């Protein structure tokens, strides 16, 4: 068996074209373009690359963008005040604060300050709470992007067994909630799990979001499983690596995402989709 590649880069390109069409239609109706604000704190190289990608995405789909690059020593109060100002900016429909933040910044307080209707990352407790109640509003971007990847396989996932490796607030937890809504049986494996391998080995779908290169090898993967690799770590050789040993999984899985070019582009396009939803006033 050789797995088919879930090309997130290609799928995201198609979705961006659809977003651009909607933005052009808004313009023809005399409606302003959607506005996205991104705040980057410090000089983390990976974050800078990611933010540059978001800027290119905004240009491609015709969004108005407001990018603020702040020094590492910005105060908690100053950052919160900037977020509140964007909440009141009528030209801005979506706000996101790029992670990671410096150690002196309380990330939870920053997320709490974002207007839930502009929380296009989908991290605010209000939006996570709605997802938990099966009444999703603005959905967390990486899980939302992954659900679109799974849809692209054409596999009916209702009733399938899924193991999510990792229980972070940004990926693992909302991912499990998305899959429950879709009718899957969900197991979350984490650092306290006694036998994560056994949970993965019996799963029809494996989603790994740990950031530990080489964690999942072929002995962990059930033949024919769908493998989604969210891991994103730069090795000593400068190359990006996922949680999954790609060459091993390629021999066992039915579908697999590459790193890079799999989940990352879908996360970014989900953020654009959320911004468009907010701009259109289609938030439940």
Image (cartoon, rainbow, N blue to C red):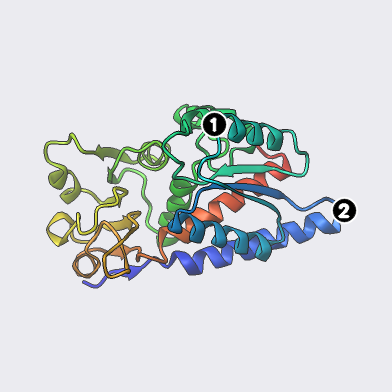
- Does the rendering let one see residue 284? no
**10 Å neighbourhood of mark 1: few (<14), some, or many (≥20)?**
some
Which residue is pictured at 72% across the width and 61% down the height?
62
- Does the rendering let one see residue 52? yes
Say which of 100 and 2 sits in front. 100
Quadrant housing the N terminus: bottom left
Say which of 101 and 116 sits in front. 101
**10 Å neighbourhood of mark 2: few (<14), some, or many (≥20)?**
few
Residue 131 position (above or below residue 40): above
Residue, disc 2:
30
Which residue is pictured at 57% across the width and 58% down the height?
54
Residue, disc 1:
76
**8 with respect to 121 (left or right):** left
**104 with respect to 112 (left or right):** left
Residue 106 position (above or below residue 236): above
Q: How far apart are marks 1 and 2 (CA)?
A: 39 Å
Q: Which of marks 1 and 2 is nearer the N terminus?
A: 2
Quadrant housing the C terminus: top right
Q: What element carries label 2?
A: loop
Which residue is pictured at 23% across the width and 38% down the height?
190
Q: What element carries label 1?
A: helix
Give how far across and how far down residue 113 sits, in percent.
59, 29
Disc number for residue 226: none
Give how far across and how far down residue 122 sits, in percent.
52, 39
């Amino acid at each position: 068996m050789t797995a088919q590649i879930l090309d997130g880069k290609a799928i995201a390109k198609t979705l961006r074209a659809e977003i651009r069409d909607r933005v052009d239609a808004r313009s023809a109706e005399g409606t302003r373009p959607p506005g996205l604000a991104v705040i980057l704190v410090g000089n983390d190289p990976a974050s800078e690359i990611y933010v540059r990608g978001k800027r290119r995405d905004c240009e491609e789909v015709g969004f108005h963008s407001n990018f603020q690059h702040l020094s590492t020593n910005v105060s908690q109060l100053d950052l919160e005040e900037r977020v509140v100002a964007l909440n009141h900016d009528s030209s801005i429909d979506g706000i996101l604060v790029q992670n990671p933040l410096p150690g002196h910044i309380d990330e939870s307080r920053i997320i709490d300050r974002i207007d839930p209707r502009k929380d296009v990352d989908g991290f605010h407790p209000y939006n996570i709470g709605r997802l938990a109640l099966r009444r999703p509003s603005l959905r967390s971007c990486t899980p939302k992007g992954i659900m679109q990847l799974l849809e692209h396989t054409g596999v009916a996932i209702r009733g399938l067994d899924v193991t999510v490796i990792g229980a972070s607030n940004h990926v693992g937890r909302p991912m499990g909630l998305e899959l429950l809504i879709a009718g899957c049986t969900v197991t979350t494996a984490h650092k306290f799990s006694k036998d994560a391998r056994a949970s993965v080995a019996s799963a029809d779908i494996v989603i790994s979001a740990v950031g530990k290169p080489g964690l999942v090898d072929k002995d962990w993967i059930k033949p024919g499983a769908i493998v989604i690799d969210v891991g994103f770590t730069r090795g000593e050789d400068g190359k990006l690596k996922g949680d999954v040993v790609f060459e091993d999984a390629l021999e066992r899985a039915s579908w697999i995402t590459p790193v890079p070019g799999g989940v990352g582009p879908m996360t970014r396009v989900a953020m654009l989709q959320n911004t468009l939803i907010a701009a259109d006033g289609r938030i439940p």
